[in-house]
Image (spheres, rainbow, N blue to C red):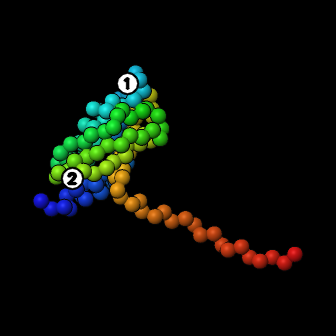
């Protein structure tokens, strides 16, 4: 089997931001099993390829910037993911999934002009 498949799915995981709204239960968290199923489904939808399984370390807290680590198994290879809460609106939690091994694209910042020497 081609080693490009996990790379394609990993890239798809990076492309997915603010994936979906999930119900938050009384303890203000997205249960681990719900999160695993949602991440698996979203990765498959984004890539068009099957994901063997997704396993997360725990529930995702319903608080902005809360995160949980997950591992997706694709074609027998593991892909490390971080799921981070981006927004909470009532009982809906929005989150993004990022590939832990991918290097983020550099962000361009406006260049500041060099200070000019002043005479005093």
Q: Residue 77 bears which disc, if any?
A: 2
Locate residue 8, reporting x and y percent: 24, 58
Instruction: Write the residue at 43% across / 32% down.
Output: 62
Taking the view exactly as shown, the residue that stands out farthest to the left is: 1
**Crowdedness of circle 2 by 10 Å Cα count: few (<14), some, many (20+)?**
few
Q: Secondary structure at mark 2?
A: strand
Q: Secondary structure at mark 1?
A: loop
7 lies above or below 86: below
Instruction: Write the residue at 74% across / 76% down.
Output: 116
Left or right: residue 120 versus residue 99 is right
The span from disc 2 to disc 1 (Cα, nearest Å) is 32 Å
Left or right: residue 62 versus residue 52 is right
Instruction: Write the residue at 19% across / 58% down.
Output: 5
Using the rendered image of the protein, determine whether residue 100 is visible from the camera's viewpoint: yes
6 lies above or below 34: below
Task: Examine the image and state in which quarter residue 6 appears.
Answer: bottom left
Are the residues tagged 2 and 1 within 8 Å (C-beta)?
no
Image quarter (top left, top right, bottom left or bottom right) of the C terminus: bottom right
Locate residue 26, reporting x and y percent: 40, 21
Q: Nearer the viewer, mark 2 or mark 1?
A: 2
- Along the polypeptide, which appears first: circle 2 or circle 1? 1
117 lies above or below 89: below
Between 31 and 111, which is closer to the camera in this rendering?
31
**Crowdedness of circle 1 by 10 Å Cα count: few (<14), some, many (20+)?**
few
Between 65 and 57, which is closer to the camera in this rendering?
57
Image quarter (top left, top right, bottom left or bottom right) of the N terminus: bottom left
Q: Residue 25 bears which disc, if any?
A: 1
Task: Report the number of numbered marks.
Answer: 2
Instruction: Write the residue at 21% across / 42% down.
Output: 53
Q: Residue 55 bears which disc, if any?
A: none
Taking the view exactly as shown, the residue that stands out farthest to the top is: 26
């Amino acid at each position: 089997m081609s080693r490009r498949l996990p790379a394609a799915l990993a890239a798809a995981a990076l492309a997915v931001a603010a994936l979906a709204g999930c119900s938050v239960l009384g303890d203000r968290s997205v249960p681990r099993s719900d999160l695993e199923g949602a991440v698996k489904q979203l990765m498959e939808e984004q890539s068009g390829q099957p994901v063997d399984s997704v396993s997360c370390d725990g529930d995702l807290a319903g608080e902005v910037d809360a995160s949980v680590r997950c591992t997706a198994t694709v074609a027998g290879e593991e892909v490390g993911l971080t799921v981070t809460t981006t927004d909470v609106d009532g009982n809906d939690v929005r989150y993004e999934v990022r590939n832990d091994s991918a290097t983020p694209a550099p962000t361009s910042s406006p260049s500041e002009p060099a200070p000019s020497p002043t005479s005093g």
